[in-house]
Image: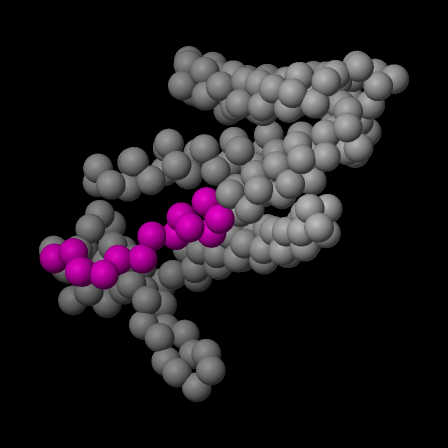
Amino acid sequence: MGAYLLEWLSLFFRWFHVIAGVAWIGASFYFVWLDLSLRKPPQWKADKGISGDLWAVHGGGFYEIAKYKLEPEEMPKTLHWFKWEAYTTWLTGAAMMSIVYYANATAYLIDPSKVPFTSIGAIATSLLFLFGSYFIYEVIVRSHLGKNAFIFSTLIFILLVIASWGSYQLFSDRASFIHIGAILGTVMVGNVFFGIMPAQRTR
């Protein structure tokens, strides 16, 4: 019964994770398109602080979209924050990692020919690997190295190669690639949670 339940939970969170990821990336692509499609507004809108204007039609309805330079004179009572797509993607990914790799560590996480971990040891190493990688990223991005785009990009690429090698040495082949994806996803969501959202709230 337990194995049967885990299979269903794995299936549920796998598809939930995919759908949330599509929504997250889709929203990002939409705003890239939106910023590129904005046009200079008429003067009466510019006087209100609007920097870009766009009219669109979809599903028989007409939409008027305006982008403010800073914030409107009066904030609306209901404001949608584009953050839950990212959070849901990470949470469902974490749930899937727990169900597939941690609950079945001996089958999916551990490769005895590489490192003969116990289940607890493998899970602890996995968590340390994931959050340790994110901590290193945060230290770099908040240091002076993060101010130079070329140095930062080169350093992150080198560290990602090292992480890929290290993951392959520690975990099963399948789990090693999943860990690299989990690192990238954690970094992206961490940027939203610790960087983008606090900055927007203080504006």
Q: Is residue 184 visible?
A: yes
Nearer to me, 45 or 88: 88
Q: What is the x, y in percent for residue 59? A: 47, 82
Q: Quadrant of residue 167?
A: top right
Q: Quadrant of residue 161?
A: top right
- The colouring scheme, among rainbow, by chain, secondary structure or one colour, is one colour
Q: Compared to 160, does 49 lie above or below?
A: below
- The residue that appears at 69% across and 40% down in the rendered structure is 100
Chief secondary structure of the magenta span?
A: loop
In the rendered image, which quarter contains the C terminus?
top left
Q: Residue at the left extreme?
A: 73
Nearer to me, 143 or 99: 99
Q: What is the x, y in percent for residue 88? A: 49, 48
Q: What is the x, y in percent for residue 118? A: 72, 18
Q: Is residue 178 visible?
A: no
Q: Compared to 189, does 18 lie above or below?
A: below
Q: What is the x, y in percent for residue 188? A: 51, 36
- Span colored in magenta: 74-88
In the rendered image, residue 83 lying in the magenta stretch gets the answer yes
Q: Compared to 98, does 49 lie above or below?
A: below
Nearer to me, 130 or 13: 13
Q: Compared to 157, does 40 lie above or below?
A: below
- The residue that appears at 66% across and 17% down in the rendered structure is 121
- The residue that appears at 57% across and 39% down in the rendered structure is 94
Q: Residue at the bottom extreme?
A: 60
Nearer to me, 82 or 57: 82
Left or right of residue 141, residue 183 in this image: right
